[in-house]
Image (tube, rainbow, N blue to C red):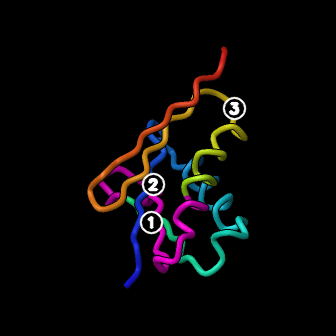
Amino acid sequence: MSELFAIKVLDDEAGDETRSLISWLQLEDELTGAQIRSSGSPIRTGEMGVVTDLVEVAMQPDGIGVGLVTATLTWPSTRQGSMKVSLTKNGQTLQIEVPRPS
């Protein structure tokens, strides 16, 4: 049975940072074999398409969850500006914030 993690980049209305996080996770050697996919909110009236707002990661319960957490916590340091990310598994959420000076 797979473990399912949900990762959300908070305050990412256009979905650009979420897509960046997906790319980052896909390059992580420790996550080889994990299924990493994006999920988006339904299209609302006046919108041109789906905004990617959630990363879902499914992996076998063999200890690589630590690699996912490490990669997720490292990623904000590669970005500009402040960053808030939440990671949820089994209803428990870890939220981190990386402040950046203006």
Of the residues shown, which amino acid type is indicated by label 2?
A: Ile
Q: In the figure, 9 relative to 88: above or below? A: above
Q: Secondary structure at mark 3?
A: loop
Give the side of residue 40 with respect to residue 102, left or right: left
Q: Are marks 1 and 3 in contact (CB under 8 Å)?
A: no
47 in the magenta segment: yes
Per the model, the C-alpha gap separating discs 1 and 2 is 6 Å
At label 3, which amino acid type do we have?
Gln
In the image, the segment drawn in magenta is 41-68
N-terminal-most mark, 1 or 3: 1
Residue 78 is situated, as x and y percent measured from the top left of the image, at 72, 41
Q: Quadrant of residue 90?
A: bottom left
What is the total number of numbered labels drawn onto the structure image? 3
- Tell whether label 2 touches label 1 (CB within 8 Å): yes
- Give the distance between the C-alpha atoms of the residues marked 1 and 3, in whole angstroms: 23 Å
Marks 3 and 2 sit apart, C-alpha to C-alpha, by 19 Å
Q: Quadrant of residue 1?
A: bottom left
Report which residue position mark 1 lands on.
Answer: 56
Crowd rating for badge 3 (residues with CA inside 10 Å; few <14, some 14–19, many 20+)? few
Of tags 3 and 2, the one toward the viewer is: 2
Q: Where residue 45 sits in the image (x, y, percent)?
A: 29, 53
Give the image location of residue 37, x and y in percent: 51, 70
For the residue marked with disc 1, what is the amino acid? Glu
Q: Residues within 10 Å of mark 1 (few under 14, many from 20)?
A: some
Which circle marks residue 80 in the picture?
3
Residue at image x 54%, y 52%? 18
Report the front residue among 19 and 94: 94
Residue that extends furthest to the front in the rendered view of this protein: 63
Residue topped by disc 2: 7
